[in-house]
Image (spheres, rainbow, N blue to C red):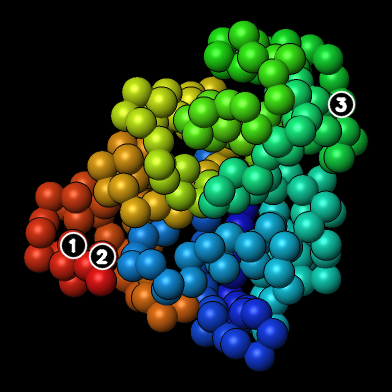
Amino acid sequence: MLHLERVRAGYGSTPVLHGISLSLESGEIAAVLGRNGVGKTTLMRAISGTIPCNGGNLSFQGNDLGSLSAFKRARLGISHVPQGRDIFPKLTVAENLRVASSAVGKSRGDDLEDLFEQFPVLAEKRRARGGSLSGGQQQILALARALMSRPKLLLLDEPSEGIQPSILDEIATTIEQINSEHGIAVLVVEQNLDFAARVAHRGLMMDKGEIIEEMDITQLSRDRALQRRYMAL
């Protein structure tokens, strides 16, 4: 479904991704793991098109993404939940969701009601401004907003960051459900090994802008020596 070959990207004259290669199959969940500052967020932005690639090949379901803008990638079926969530704080919950579906030309009222049924907390807060929600509720809103476009690939950047355990459990359950019931592929960047081990089928270790190893996340979550080697600052 998703294929990157020797992709390079960065910010201005500062390179961050140094020829990164990875593949994701349809319906698969993979977690990108590594220390802070190794390029994980940059990788997600390069895939979604919010920053340009400086080299290499990037394709999605056989479509070359190299020259496509972010909104065109979204219309192909790539949804990105960025680190920090980036919801619209002055729009209501319902408006945040409608904007997402309209932006990709898939506006349907029943999709909105389906999401309210799936996320009761959002139904209760549908008229509340996004900025008034708690951090956990904002993360759920950001995830629901991404699902409004009915994606084929979901990019999640640090979904566990600053989230209380009960909300995090709900997010993990949602990821498992959309993957098993709808076949949505997921690429998730994470520091929380327990969360990554629960949702992902495999782990991709990243260091200095490259994927350096593929490994069993369950093994990593239990092995302190591996954690010090790959995750410790």
The amino acid at mark 1 is Gln
- Crowding around mark 2 (Cα neighbors within 10 Å: few <14, some 14 to 19, many 20+) is some
Q: Which residue is mark 2?
A: 231
Farthest residue, direction bottom: 13
Q: Which residue does the image show at 58% across and 26% down from the upper left?
A: 133
The amino acid at mark 2 is Met
Residue closest to the eye, 170 or 65: 170
Q: Is residue 180 above or below residue 142?
A: above
Q: Which residue does the image show at 58% across and 86% down from the upper left?
A: 15
Closer to the chain start, of discs 2 and 3, is: 3
- Crowding around mark 1 (Cα neighbors within 10 Å: few <14, some 14 to 19, many 20+) is some
The amino acid at mark 3 is Ser
Q: Is residue 54 left or right of residue 177?
A: right
Q: Quadrant of residue 70?
A: bottom right
Check contact, mark 1 vs mark 2: CB within 8 A.
yes
Q: Which residue is mark 3?
A: 107
Q: Which residue does the image show at 27% across and 60% down from the upper left?
A: 215
Residue closest to the eye, 171 or 2: 171
Tag shown at residue 227: 1
Q: Position of residue 47 (x, y in %)?
A: 65, 62
Q: Position of residue 205 (x, y in %)?
A: 34, 66
Q: Is residue 211 above or below residue 195?
A: below
Closer to the chain start, of discs 3 and 1, is: 3
Q: Is residue 178 above or below residue 15?
A: above
Q: Position of residue 128 (x, y in %)?
A: 69, 18
